């Protein structure tokens, strides 16, 4: 599916992470049509108590908008909220899976 991170679309990355999170027991939310939502809100909100993750997804070269930077900074300022900017290389390296699996008994 995602062999070369340079050619992965954000939508493909989002679906892969969403599916993996659900499989690992996370309650997952993403905005289906961001055009009608508050600008900058993160792409994914994942909850598996006691953890809360908010993640912005970008292509390898994608940059966060000013509104996305603001939202992520506000979430980052909250205690116990994990914030990430994930790219296709984050998925391919196993970083995302490692983060989502934290706290699961082996």
Image: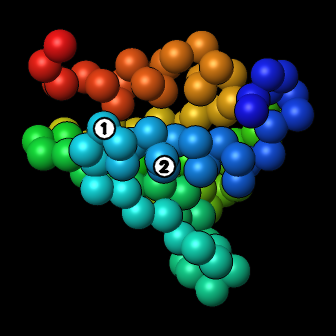
Tell me residue 3's x, y (percent). Answer: 79, 22
* As drawn, 41 above or below 18: below
Q: Quadrant of residue 76?
A: top left
Q: Dot 2 corresponds to which residue?
A: 18
Q: Is residue 58 visible?
A: yes
Place residue 36 in its image quadrant: bottom right
Q: Nearer the viewer, residue 26 or 60?
A: 26
**Cα distance in 3D space between marks 2 and 1:** 10 Å
Residue 39 as seen in the image, left or right of residue 98 = right
Q: Are marks 2 and 1 in contact (CB under 8 Å)?
A: no
Residue pictured at 44% horizontal, 39% vertical: 20
What is the secondary structure assignment of the residue under circle 2?
Answer: helix
In terms of depth relative to the viewer, which is nearer, 104 or 72? Answer: 104
Picture quarter with the C terminus = top left
> Is 31 in front, or is 63?
31
- The crowd level at tag 1 (other Cα within 10 Å; few <14, some 14-19, many 20+) is some
Residue placed at 36% from the left, 48% from the top? 22
Give the answer, above or below, for where 35 lies relative to 69: below
Image spot of residue 2 (x, y percent): 75, 29
Q: Nearer the viewer, residue 5 or 71?
A: 5
Marker disc for residue 24: 1
Determine the secondary structure under disc 1: loop
Return the residue found at the far bottom: 36
């Amino acid at each position: 599916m995602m062999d070369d991170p340079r050619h992965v679309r954000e939508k493909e990355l989002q679906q892969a992470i969403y599916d993996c999170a659900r499989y690992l027991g996370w309650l997952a939310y993403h905005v289906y049509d961001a055009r009608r939502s508050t600008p900058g809100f993160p792409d994914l909100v994942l909850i598996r108590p006691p953890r809360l993750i908010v993640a912005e997804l970008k292509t390898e070269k994608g940059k966060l908008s000013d509104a996305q930077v603001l939202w992520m900074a506000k979430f980052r300022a909250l205690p116990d909220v994990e914030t990430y900017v994930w790219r296709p290389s984050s998925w391919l390296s196993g970083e995302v899976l490692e983060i989502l699996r934290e706290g699961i008994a082996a």
